[in-house]
Amino acid sequence: MNKNDFMEKLLDGVEVEWLPLGHLGEFVRGNGMQKKDFVYEGFPAIHYGQIYTKFDLSAEESYTYVTFDLAKKLKVAVKGDLLLATTSENDEDVVKPLAWLGDKVAISGDMMLFRHAQNVKYLAYFLKTDEFQSQKRKHITGAKVRRVSKDSLAKILVPIPCPNNPEKSLKIQAEIVRILDAFTELTTELTTELTTELNLRKKQYNYYRDKLLSFEEGEVEWKTLGELAENLDSKRKPIRSGLREAGDVPYYGASGIVDYIKDYIFDGDFLLVSEDGANLLARKTPIAFSVSGKTWVNNHAHILKFDTYAERRYVEYYLNSIDLTPFISGAAQPKLNKKNLEAIRIPNPLLEEKERIVLILDKFDTLTSSITSGLPHEIELRNKQYEHYRDMLFSFPKQDDVVV
C-alpha cells in the first residue's frame, strides 16, 4: 500500500487542519530546581537533562525526587502534559519531547510543560518528525547553548484531524499512536536482537584478534614501531579553521576527519595514530586508523608509512588491541609523543603470517564495524524504516497544499 492509499484509508476523507500549538494549549515554563536538590524520596521530579539521558518518548515514573517543601515552589506537570527540554548543545535535540503519563511531577528550569486536550503521545510522536524539525530550525537561537522560546513554540503547526469534532479527532490520534507504538515495539525488538548479535560478534572478534596477535616467548622476533614504519610527522601541517578552503580532501586530526579542504599534503596509504586527546585513555574510538588517497593531516595525529597493506593493517590491529598507558604522558592532557610511539614493541612474524592474520581480522572488522555492510548497517536500516513510516503517518496535506 502506498502512502496516499494508506492515509486515505486511515482518514477516510476527514478534514485535517494544521493548527499552531499556541491555539491547542498553553506552555508553562519550569523553574528553580537543580540537581543538588534531589533527595532519595519525596515528591517526583524531572530535571531537563534527564529528558535527554533517562527517558524515551513517554514515561509515567520519575527517576528522582525533591522535598515536598521545594515542590510547593515548583511548576508541576500532570498526566497528559507534554514535557519539553528547551535548551540543548545541538539543534537536533533541542525541544526533545516526553509524553507524561504518570501522576504529578515537578519540572526544572530549561524545560516547560504543554497543557492541552490532544493525545499527548500523538503530539510527542509528531515532535520527532522531520516536519517538526524543519519548522523548529527557524526558531532556534543562541550560540553555544541552543534554545527555543515559548512564543516560538506557540507558532509551530501541528496536523489535527477533525478539529471541530474532538471525540473523533482523539480516536484518529489514538489510532495513529497505536500504529506507531506497535511499530516502535517491533523496531525495538529487531534492533535489540541485532545489537545483541553485534555485541556477540564483537566479543568473537576481540577473542580471535587477541588470539591471533598473541605469540609465545621466542616464537617470533619483536621490533619497535620505529623499526617497522617510516614516520612522516615532519610533513604534517595544521590549518586554522578560518583559513581552510572548502573542498573534498579529508583533513584529519587525532580521532579522524575534522574537515574537508581543497588541497592535500599526502597521497597514498598511511596509518594515523592519535598523538593527543582524552581518547588515548578512554579508547572509545580506535587510536590507530588507516587512510588512503589524497589527505591532509594536522599535528594531532602521527603519520606512519609501511611497505605493504598487510604490514600497515597488522600494526593497526595490534596497536588498537594493547594497553598504551605506559607510553602516554600527561593526565589532564594525555599525549603519545613521537619518541614513545616509536618505542612500542611489536611482534614481527613473517609477511605471510601477517597477511593471514589481516585477512581474518578484515572479515571480522567488516561485519562488526562497517556501516555499509554487516549488522550495523542492518540496524541503521531498521531505524530509518521506522522513521520513514512515522513521518508518513504525519504527512497530512497542509492548507496551502490543498487544491480546491
Image (tube, rainbow, N blue to C red):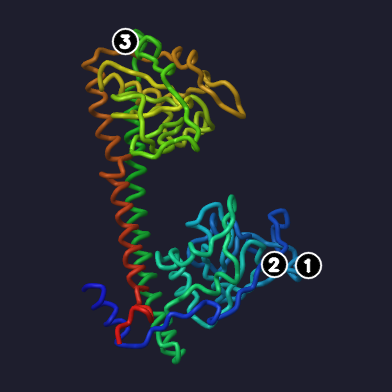
Task: First in sequence, mark 3 or 2: give its number.
Answer: 2
Relative side of 287 to 66, left or right = left
In the drawing, what numbered circle is on residue 220? 3
The answer to whether mark 3 and mark 2 are in CB contact below 8 A is no
Residue 69, numbered circle: 1
Vertical placement of residue 81 versus 191, above or below: below
Q: Position of residue 66 (x, y in %)?
A: 71, 62
Q: CA distance from mark 1 to mark 2?
A: 9 Å
The quadrant in which residue 45 appears is bottom right
Mark 3 → mark 2, Cα distance in angstroms: 65 Å
User: Is 69 left or right of 388, judged from the image as shown?
Assistant: right
Amino acid at circle 3:
Val
Task: Label 1: state its secondary structure.
Answer: helix
| Label 2 sits on residue | 43
Instruction: Give coordinates of residue 142: x percent, y percent.
Output: 59, 56
Looking at the image, residue 242 lies above or below residue 67: above
Going from the N terminus, do you reach mark 1 or mark 3 first?
1
| Callout 2 amino acid | Phe
Q: Residue at x 26, y 77 (%)?
A: 6
Residue shown at 55%/78% (left/top)?
22
